[in-house]
Image (tube, grey):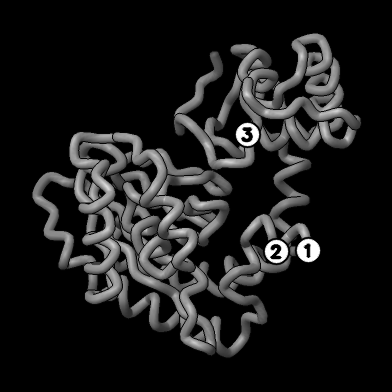
């Protein structure tokens, strides 16, 4: 088994029950999508299990992807996304434009708090982290740029869930709510009340819900129409942390970023969805 630090992944991925891809392009996409399900580094057997490919086929295609720089083989024998694929993906206009607008505000927020700063968008029923700043003194977090986080366990995720389309909310509430830490919300009724509270208050606060010892505060980022297009969050240590002290600098940064998004960003709230990318 690979070093899968994020557990199960979003619906629509591979796995032993997935239909086996037929074309070469389908097989390559299945391999790359195996990493979208969570896990920074995966073994060959885990890649094949998630993609529904025979081991021999997976071995050949993974080797070719590694030779081309799209995957990278690390010394322990596992694989991770290669820098070539990362460079291509980072040029996606929606993500690149949002990141460019957000970075100055995220840097200011980090200087004011010295806590982890995260920017996330809604993607396939998860929070896709498009940018992150972390200092040497910040509490350790599992977040990776380009990684997916559950919506029910983090400040950034709970904000995105609270302002998600109703069908997304109902899918999350009707699905499994895995426990990641001691205070993870696993009851759908409690999560529904949490979502209502976030919409009422305009922010989310979590404590020991994703990682033991880590707390977070999240707020929405809006476009010119007032639609929530992203969430900005701070992650701090749980011990001795008054989460409400994080709200003034966090909301100030989110409002400033929202003004820049309204003035300069030409995206929309659903352009990060897989359906939109596929031309749905």
Residue 163 placement (x, y as % from top left) = 41, 70
| Residue placed most toward the observer, 183 or 218 | 183
Q: Residue furthest top?
A: 56
Task: Look at mark 1 in the image and give the residue it sits on.
Answer: 279
Q: Quadrant of residue 209?
A: top left
Quarter of the picture containing the N terminus is top right
Cα separation between marks 3 and 2: 20 Å
Residue at image coords 36%, 44%:
136
Label 2 with label 1: CB-CB less than 8 Å: yes
Please say if 31 is above or below 101. Answer: above
> Which SS class for mark 3?
helix
Please rate how many residues cluster around mark 1, counting C-alpha atoms within 10 Å: few if below 14, some from 14 to 19, many from 20. few
> Which SS class for mark 2?
helix
Please rate how many residues cluster around mark 2, counting C-alpha atoms within 10 Å: few if below 14, some from 14 to 19, many from 20. few
Q: Earlier in the sequence, mark 3 or mark 2?
A: 3
Task: Look at mark 2 in the image and give the residue it sits on.
Answer: 276
Q: Which numbered mark, 3 or 1, is in the foreground of this view?
A: 1
Residue at image coords 29%, 63%:
195
Q: Is residue 208 left or right of residue 78?
A: left
Residue 154 placement (x, y as % from top left) = 33, 51
| Residue placed most toward the observer, 164 or 267 | 164
């Amino acid at each position: 088994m690979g070093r899968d630090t994020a557990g199960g992944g979003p619906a629509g991925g591979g796995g032993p029950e997935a239909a086996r891809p037929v074309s070469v392009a389908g097989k390559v996409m299945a391999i790359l999508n195996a990493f979208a399900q969570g896990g920074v580094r995966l073994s060959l057997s885990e890649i094949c299990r998630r993609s529904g490919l025979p081991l021999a086929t997976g071995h050949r295609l993974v080797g070719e992807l590694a030779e081309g720089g799209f995957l990278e083989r690390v010394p322990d024998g596992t694989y991770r996304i290669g820098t070539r694929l990362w460079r291509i993906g980072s040029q996606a206009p929606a993500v690149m434009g949002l990141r460019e607008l957000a970075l100055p505000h995220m840097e200011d927020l980090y200087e004011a708090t010295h806590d982890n700063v995260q920017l996330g968008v809604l993607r396939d029923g998860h929070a896709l982290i498009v940018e992150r700043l972390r200092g040497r003194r910040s509490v350790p977090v599992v977040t990776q740029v380009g990684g997916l986080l559950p919506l029910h366990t983090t400040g950034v995720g709970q904000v995105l869930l609270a302002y998600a389309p109703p069908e997304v909310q109902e899918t999350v509430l009707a699905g499994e709510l895995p426990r990641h830490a001691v205070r993870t919300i696993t009851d759908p009724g409690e999560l529904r009340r949490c979502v209502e509270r976030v919409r009422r208050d305009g922010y989310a606060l979590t404590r020991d819900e994703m990682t033991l010892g880590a707390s977070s505060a999240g707020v929405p980022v809006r476009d010119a129409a007032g639609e929530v297009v992203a969430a900005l969050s701070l992650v701090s240590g749980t011990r001795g942390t008054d989460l409400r002290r994080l709200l003034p600098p966090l909301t100030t940064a989110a409002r400033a970023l929202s003004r820049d998004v309204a003035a300069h960003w030409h995206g929309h709230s659903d352009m990060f969805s897989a359906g939109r990318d596929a031309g749905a």
